[in-house]
Image (cartoon, rainbow, N blue to C red):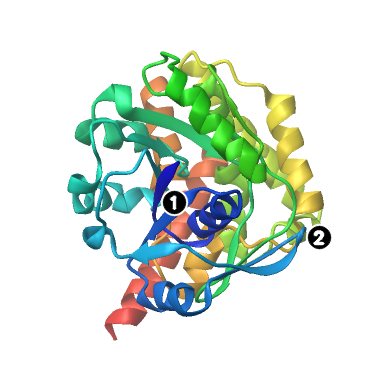
Amino acid sequence: MNISILGAGAMGSLFGGRLAESGQQVTLLDINEAHLEAIRSQGLRLQTDSGDRRVPGLSVCRPEQATGQPDLLLVFTKTQHTEQALRSVATHIGQHTLVLSLQNGLGNAEALCRHLAKEQVMIGMTTWPGDMAGPGHVHSHGEGVVRTFSVDGVERPAHAEVAAVLDAAGLQCALDPNIWTTIWEKVAFNAALNSLCAATGCTVGQLDARPEGPALVRAVVLEVLAVAQAQGIAVDAPRCLGSVSHAIAHHRAHKPSMLQDVLAGRPTEIGAINGEVVARAREVGVAVPHTETLLGLLRLIEARAAAGADE
């Protein structure tokens, strides 16, 4: 399968590397020139539980330089960059191209559907951890899964092919007709772990250093799930809490993307995660005080970083 990956940070590079290793034709599209040049000259270095190796044969370029029209475009850009990124690859997306968003947060499906026919759009989520260790260098330790389905709820043969390709790369992918349940449970997961790690500087495993950590995680998860339930989405609190506990126990050294952004002084995805939850909570009249407090803290951290960049 001819696959392009839009947004080749930690997760995009991890998926691109795994797919290339499994025999797919992969092009990484990103604007980080140092990262692209490192992959061009030395291949992508992947450190996973199965070893430390370099993945040769990956094509890399800036989005606006992409040629041809792939069978699948995987979208891993930050949510706030989705619209601009899609515009930059407009000529790269053919009528036959399926576009799959595995981005964090809410609002991605709507953004894709503003640019594409619904029949081309797939949505999903992944629990694979990934960290940038430097240009051309990604590490990922621990297990994960991928769940995906069509945005319009109609299953087509091409969707099963996409899932099979991702699964053959060892990414444990399956089609999930209840994808909105899965996405909201991942939003709850991220609203708790990503924002708490970003606000405190803790890795995922360090959140259990004090009893207050798991208690805060649980409070945020339950608030987000209450919003989902108020919108008629059937979420499973024990399953979601179990996923969070598993991450704290087994992804201990992982620095979530939101923490990586804070450490680098970049804007975070807090608006697409906690921000979207707070906005929708207000619409349905559900109180989310812990989620809203973390949103405020991250907004302050972003403002501090922006002010420092202007000085």
Which residue appears at 50% of the width and 76% of the height?
Answer: 135
Q: In which quarter of the image is the C terminus?
A: bottom left
Amino acid type, callout 1: Ile
The percent position of residue 240, horizontal first and vertical second, equals 68, 31
Q: Which of the two residues, 157 or 89, is positioned nearer the viewer here?
A: 157
Farthest bottom residue?
311
| Callout 1 secondary element | loop
Which residue appears at 53% of the width and 37% of the height?
Answer: 125
Seen in the image, is 84 located left or right of residue 141? left
| Callout 2 secondary element | loop
> Is residue 209 shown above or below 132?
above
- Residue 214 visible in the displayed image: yes
Q: Which of marks 2 and 1 is nearer the N terminus?
A: 2
Identify the disc placed on residue 37: none
Q: In which quarter of the image is the N terminus?
A: top left
- How far separated are the C-alphas under marks 2 and 1? 24 Å
Residue that numbered label 1 is attached to: 270
Residue that numbered label 2 is attached to: 209
Q: Splitting the image into 4 quarters, where does residue 185 fall?
A: top right
Amino acid type, callout 2: Ala
The percent position of residue 92, horizontal first and vertical second, equals 24, 47
Seen in the image, is 192 located left or right of residue 252? left
Q: Splitting the image into 4 quarters, where does residue 237 fall?
A: top right
> Is residue 37 shown above or below 245?
below
Q: Residues within 10 Å of mark 2 (few under 14, many from 20)?
A: few
Contact, CB < 8 Å: mark 2 with mark 1?
no
Q: Splitting the image into 4 quarters, where does residue 122 fall?
A: top left
The percent position of residue 163, horizontal first and vertical second, equals 55, 31
